[in-house]
Image: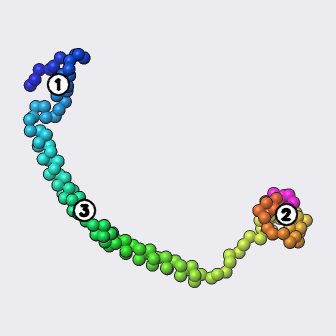
Amino acid sequence: MREPVELSMQDDNRMNGLDVLDPGYDRPGYWRERRAAIMERVAFELARRRAAARESVAAVLTGWSRSLIPVGVAAAAIAAVLVTAEARRDAQPEPQLVLQDILGVEADERSFESLLSSGRTASAGAFMALVEGGNP
C-alpha cells in the first residue's frame, strides 16, 4: 500500500492524493472486470436496440397496428351501441322548471303578471331581477 502524500496548495501534482478514491486503486483489473460484467448484463437490451434501429417506419407502424386496429374497432362498436341506445330513447323533453317553481310562493303577482303579459324575450338580467325581488 502506498504512503499518504502530503499536499500543499503550491503543489502542481495535487491529483495524486485522489488516487485512493479510485475503486481500482489496489486492484489493477477492476475496471476491465467491471466493464465485462456490465456488458454481460446489458447484452440483451443492446441487441434489442440494434434490431429496433434497423426496422423501417412501415414495420414500426405495422407492429403498432396489431394492437391499435382492434382497440379502434372496439371503440367504434361501443360508440355505435351508445348512439343507438340514445336514439331509441323517447324524444320526450324532460319536465322543465316553470317560473312559478323557481320563484316559489313569495312571487309578487304584479311582477309575475307583467312578465307574462309582455312580449319581450327572456333575458338573464330580467330573470335575476325578478328572482331577487326587483321588477324587470
Q: Which disc is residue 133 wearing?
A: none
SS at circle 2: loop
Q: Quadrant of the C terminus?
A: bottom right
Q: Which disc is residue 52 wearing?
A: 3
The secondary structure that most of the magenta stretch takes on is loop
How far across and down, in percent of the image, does residue 28 sit?
Answer: 8, 35
Name the image quarter holding residue 62: bottom left
How far across and down, in percent of the image, does residue 63 sit?
Answer: 30, 70
Nearest the eye: 136 or 101: 136
Q: Is there any visible trace of residue 109 in the rendered image? A: no
Nearest the eye: 56 or 26: 56
Residue at image point 52% right, 77% down: 82
The residue carrying pointer 2 sits among few (fewer than 14), some (14 to 19) or many (20 or more) residues within 10 Å by Cα, namely some
Residue 134 within the magenta-colored segment of the rendering = yes
Residue type indicated by callout 1 = Asn
Disc 2 target residue = 107
Disc 1 target residue = 16
Residue at image point 23% right, 63% down: 54
In the image, residue 131 above or below residue 25? below
First in sequence, mark 3 or 1: give its number.
1
The residue carrying pointer 1 sits among few (fewer than 14), some (14 to 19) or many (20 or more) residues within 10 Å by Cα, namely few
Disc 2 and disc 1 in contact, CB within 8 angstroms: no
Region in magenta: 132-136
Residue type indicated by callout 2 = Ala
Residue at image point 11% right, 42% down: 32
**Residue at far right of view:** 110
Q: Is residue 16 left or right of residue 28?
A: right
Residue type indicated by callout 3 = Ala
The residue carrying pointer 3 sits among few (fewer than 14), some (14 to 19) or many (20 or more) residues within 10 Å by Cα, namely few
